[in-house]
Image (cartoon, coloured by chain):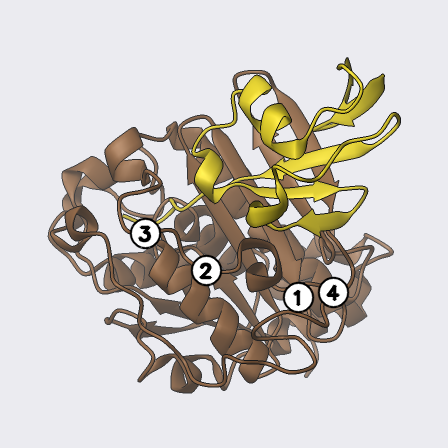
Chain colours: A brown, B yellow
Amino acid sequence: MAFTNEQLERYSRHIILKEVGAKGQKKLSQAKVLIIGAGGLGAPAALYLAAAGVGTIGIVDADEVDLSNLQRQVIHTTPDIGKPKVQSAKETMEAINPDVTVNTYHTFVTSENVLDLIKDYDFILDGTDNFPAKFLINDACVMAKKPFSHAGIIRFKGQLMTYVPGQGPCYRCVFKNPPPKDAVPTCKQAGVIGAMGGVIGSLQAMEAVKYIVGAGDLLTGYLLTFDALKMEWHKVKLPPDTSKCAVCGEHPTITELVDYEQAECDMKK
Amino acid sequence: MKITVAGKIKEYDDGITVAKLVELENVETPEYVTVTVNDEFVESHDFANTTIKDGDTVEFLYFMGGGQA
């Protein structure tokens, strides 16, 4: 596939980068990225991946756009209220870049559908808001040998890490099991500063793009945390020994996907 | 002794345990924090019997769940 003149202009700031170039831009156009959650994290990630010319972007979300989303979920606009988030996200992405094919999945991720959802994609972004989904996505990506970006945001803090099969720890290596429901606050309970989704979700898009074009070092083996009140970043080296992990270790005890119980307050909306 | 906690050098008494450090550092939801000492995990049931030594590097890793709804 050769680029049209319009595409050469659209992607000129990428193509001029030695780490991307025409070759990397072509890889982006052939890449397939799945974003799970079209919310605080998924919204900015989807905008940047669409703008970057990622050829196929899948987006999974069961919710409709709510007024309380618009403080941070910048892919949706006021007239989108009531619309499925996946539909609203698709319309915005296609408006940004008609080169992109957007596949929508208006559903929650479950142990029944997650392997099927991720199977055709090269890289997965976890933009979900709850631990059952985060562990499910981790375990499914480990089992299906898919690279993915984990991220979480709360109040004025954010974190992310990248899992690439065979290249370092998975989310479960670090966090073992989901906390009991309501033991650890969610954004809805504790609040989150809107721009935090932009900071961390954009970094997830950054990791996806770097993975696709093969540039630089990924956040494999590290957890990057950001504290906006102190304006401090901290890159924590994770223990490299994954052999004892219950899912990605040498003798996994988790060999089937689990639907953990969801915090009730998050199920309502 | 001097130890590095979450990237910052701090002064603590010799012989402090992980459990005591978790308390003194005001770790939120201490039951659910993941701790590493010198890039190795310390299991939560070992917090009370794991002593931190001069020059050690300690990290606290927290659950962060938000992002979507």
Q: Is residue A197 visible?
A: no
Relative horizontal placement of residue A253, taking residue A14 as reference (left or right): left
Mark 1 on the same chain as mark 3: yes
Q: CA distance from mark 4 to mark 3?
A: 26 Å
Residue B3 drawn at (x, y percent):
81, 23
**In the rendered structure, are the residues bearing label 1 and label 2 in contact, judged by CB atoms less than 8 Å apart?**
no
Which structural element holds mark 4?
loop
Residue A92 drawn at (x, y percent):
35, 55
Mark 3 on the same chain as mark 2: yes
Q: Is residue A14 visible?
A: yes
Question: Which comes sooner in the sequence, label 4 or label 2?
Answer: 4
Question: Which comes sooner in the sequence, label 1 or label 3?
Answer: 1
Dot 1 amino acid type: Asn
Residue A84 drawn at (x, y percent):
19, 61
On the image, which quarter does residue B52 sit in? top right
Relative horizontal placement of residue A6, taking residue A73 as reference (left or right): right
On the image, which quarter does residue A211 sit in? bottom right
Question: Which comes sooner in the sequence, label 1 or label 2?
Answer: 1
Within-10-Å neighbours for mark 1: few <14, some 14–19, many 20+? few
Q: Residue at x 62, y 64 (%)?
A: A170
Dot 3 amino acid type: Pro
